Amino acid sequence: MRTLEKQSIDRKARMKLEPVHKQYRAPEIRKNDYLEITPGFTMEEAMKEAARCLQCPKAPCVNACRVGNDIPLAMLLVEQGEFVRAAEVYRETNPLPEICGRVCPPDDSCAASCVLDKQGKGIDTRAIERFVTDYQRLHSGVPLPDKAPPTGKRVAVIGSGPSGLLVAEEALKAGHQVSVYDALPIPGGLLVYGIPGFKLEKDIVEWKIRWLEALGAEFITNTRIGEDISFDELFEPEMFDAIYLGTGAQTHARMGIEGENLGNIHDALDFINGANLPPSILPSGVEPLNSIGKRVAVIGGGDTATDCVRTALRLGAEQVTCYYRRTETEMPGNRIDRNYAEEEGASFEFLTAPIRFLDRSSDGHVDSMEMIRMELGEPDDSGRRRPIPIQGSEYSVEVEHVVLSIGFWADTFIPEQTEGIQLDRKGFIIVDPETGRTTRPGVFAGGDAVSGPELVSEALQLSRFAVAGILGYLNGE
Ligand SMILES: Cc1cc2nc3c(=O)[nH]c(=O)nc-3n(C[C@H](O)[C@H](O)[C@H](O)COP(=O)(O)OP(=O)(O)OC[C@H]3O[C@@H](n4cnc5c(N)ncnc54)[C@H](O)[C@@H]3O)c2cc1C
């Protein structure tokens, strides 16, 4: 293999190199389907982009990456065309690199911390991670890792989102048997039943599930723990020695205003899933959505709201507006996805919120919203300035469908069914931060169920702590 010493890098010359830009599908074409909006880098583009890396000694990108990928080493390999070796570098620290390479938010990840970002020339590290790990998967395959000799111990993972998948993989590698339970029809958590196809195509998640099955994981779907099987049953003899709770935070927040239960007012996840997923895998009670009215309002300001906006456009809505009660500065969703939404035809309105949903035609469906304008007051608990309604500023907006995307709470279903699992005041599971240990012996937790709604990379980071706790516990530590 050719090698490239870090010392031989001419940083000044590299700083002058121009970024390689990915190709994007045209907005008027991509808004007709749920396929990813960029094919990502080609081989040549990935090598050229990686060759701009300055190999910074302090590597802020590694510190910014929640799973601690050795990005400079990967860049060094990619610029030499060593794609499979670079993919292995990512896989050492990240069990889902082809997924993170697609969904990590560009403005809150390794890419945003690149020193070249100050000149607007940050290296597109996410696209490179995506390219090399796709390359390996599609060209040479991803070999199964060695497993420790069987320990005879059994681990139950509840929830098959990213955090549950990480725990399953690591427990299998350590020689334990693993069963992964999920309430939904197919495994993947929000990777399937949340993140839309235009950000992450589902065959990648399916591939990972098959890979874990080949490693020895058993997936048991359509099984809600606490309902189909009681939580305490999992601790009976011959059942499990340790349990991981990766149950996420998927309980929709509600506005608590008049008319919220009218027809054609959708919760965000039901809306995204009804539109994005084939009917055969929809959760029970979620209706397939093939088309939608002309005017759609999305209420909220996070990434999920932007995903709903873009989904409404793909369903054929002509006028899609996202209403947010603060200004764009306070908006939690990332700007880059909002740009894509605007390119696709959406608009955003700030400092405004609905106070009532109306059914003037009395057919049981929403047809307008009474809105009120806001101004910003002092910061609230979240540190963001509090929106204050401006009395007398009410106005009306005609709509045919409304999507509510105002946040998620924890699902407290399991802790309510059993003894000893303590929750914080918001309903998230309390754990020891270094081991993911809950207040009940043998039970560990991580991901959104602990942190509240976050990111895939954050869920992976928290479940990594829980893996340390589970493996130590099963070793009798
Ligand atoms: C619309 C949307 C878009 C998003 N986009 C992005 C993005 O672009 N980038 C990003 O980094 N993050 C994104 N996120 C956030 C990310 O998906 C989550 O942070 C991550 O999936 C959390 O992982 P998790 O494993 O903790 O839980 P989840 O992925 O939520 O999985 C939890 C699983 O537990 C199962 N479960 C719950 N209770 C039970 C029970 N009692 N019995 C059995 N199973 C149970 C659920 O069915 C679910 O499958 C998005 C979230 C949403 C909602």
Image (tube, grey):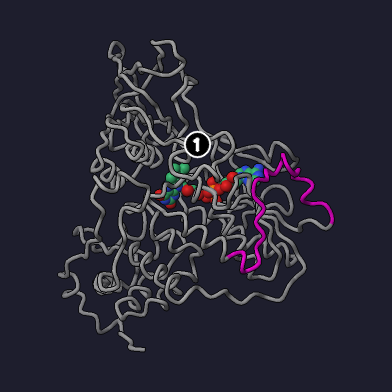
Q: In this view, does 10 lie to the left or right of 464?
A: left
| Quarter holding residue 300 | top left
**What residue do we see at 73% from left, 42% from top?**
228
Q: Where, quadrant-wise, is the N terminus in this rendering?
A: bottom left
Q: Is residue 270 above or below residue 450?
A: above
Question: What are the residue bounds of the magenta stretch?
Answer: 212-237
Task: In this rendered view, identify the residue nearer to me: 38 or 177.
Answer: 38
Query: Is residue 359 in the magenta section?
Result: no
Helix, strand or loop status at disc 1: strand
Task: In this rendered view, identify the residue nearer to me: 57 or 257.
Answer: 257
Give how far across and how far down residue 105 sits, in percent. Answer: 36, 52
Q: Callout 1: 10 Å neighbours few (<14), some, many (20+)?
A: some
- In the rendered image, is residue 344 in sight? yes
**What residue do we see at 83% from left, 58% from top?**
238
| Quarter holding residue 272 | top left
Question: What amino acid type is highlighted by mark number 1?
Answer: Phe
Query: Is residue 223 in the magenta section?
Result: yes
Residue under pointer 1: 408
Give how far across and how far down residue 63 sits, in percent. Answer: 40, 63
Give how far across and how far down residue 22 sits, in percent. Answer: 25, 61
Q: Is residue 235 left or right of residue 304?
A: right
Q: In this view, does 281 lie above or below 39?
A: above
- In the rendered image, is residue 448 in sight? no
Task: In this rendered view, identify the residue nearer to me: 178 or 202.
Answer: 202
Q: Is mark 1 within 8 Å of ligand 1?
A: yes
Give how far across and how far down residue 23 sits, in percent. Answer: 24, 59
